[in-house]
Amino acid sequence: MRVVKKSESLLGGLRGRKVAVLGLAFKPGTDDVREAAAIEIIRELLARGAEVRVHDPAALDNAMRVLGGGVTYCQRIQDCLDGADLAIISTEWPEYALLDPSTVMSLMHNPIIIDGRRILDNKRFREAGVKTYTIGLYQ
């Protein structure tokens, strides 16, 4: 999985690292996690020793049924990002596009975001000191 390999490369390994995954549903506006890329990403992160926190405005309950324990389920985006070494955006929920770079800077231990849905204003985040990487775009 490219996202997991990129995460591992950026952090110099995943064991013991805190990774926030924003978005669990396969698309915004649903609670359906069947065949959602986020589920496989989370499983791979866990297999490589990462501590994973997740947020989704609608799909937390369904994700809990699929993933079970070993993952921290967060009702608030801020709780998911708090102390994280890296965040992955895997569903294009509007609230993720509206993230404030200064809030991200203040919450995350290591402000790195992999934007798997191309929803962030990379220029704005980088100007605030947040490292952003967009899957599929040359960086």
Image (cartoon, helix red, strand yellow):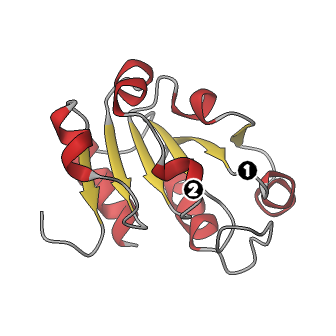
Image position, residue 120 (x, y; %): 36, 54
Residue lying furthest top: 106
Closer-to-camera residue (1/25): 25
The residue to which callout 1 is attached is: 57
Which quarter of the image is occupied by the N terminus? bottom left
> What type is the residue that disc 2 sits on?
Pro
> What type is the residue that disc 1 sits on?
Pro
Callout 1 crowding tier (Cα within 10 Å): few <14, some 14–19, many ≥20: some
Residue lying furthest bottom: 35
Image position, residue 91 (x, y; %): 56, 64
Q: Is residue 12 visible?
A: no
Question: Which residue lies at the image location 74% right of the left edge and 71% below the top edge?
Answer: 33
Pick whichever of labels 2 and 1 is earlier in the sequence. Answer: 1
In the drawing, does residue 29 fall left or right of residue 41?
right
User: Which secondary structure, mark 2?
Assistant: helix
Q: Which mark is residue 94?
A: 2
In the drawing, does residue 134 fall left or right of residue 99?
left
Look at the picture and state if 98 lies above or below 108: below
Image position, residue 12 (x, y; %): 23, 43
In the drawing, does residue 88 fall left or right of residue 2?
right
Q: Quadrant location of residue 17? A: top left
Question: Which residue lies at the image location 65% right of the left edge and 74% below the top edge?
Answer: 26
Q: Is residue 28 visible?
A: yes
Which quarter of the image is occupied by the C terminus? bottom left
Number of numbered markers: 2
In the drawing, does residue 6 fall left or right of residue 117?
left
Look at the picture and state if 85 lies above or below 120: above
* Gap between marks 2 and 1 measured at Cα: 10 Å
Q: Which mark is residue 92?
A: none
Question: Which residue lies at the image location 43% right of the left edge and 44% below the top edge?
Answer: 87
Callout 2 crowding tier (Cα within 10 Å): few <14, some 14–19, many ≥20: few
Look at the picture and state if 100 lies above or below 10: above
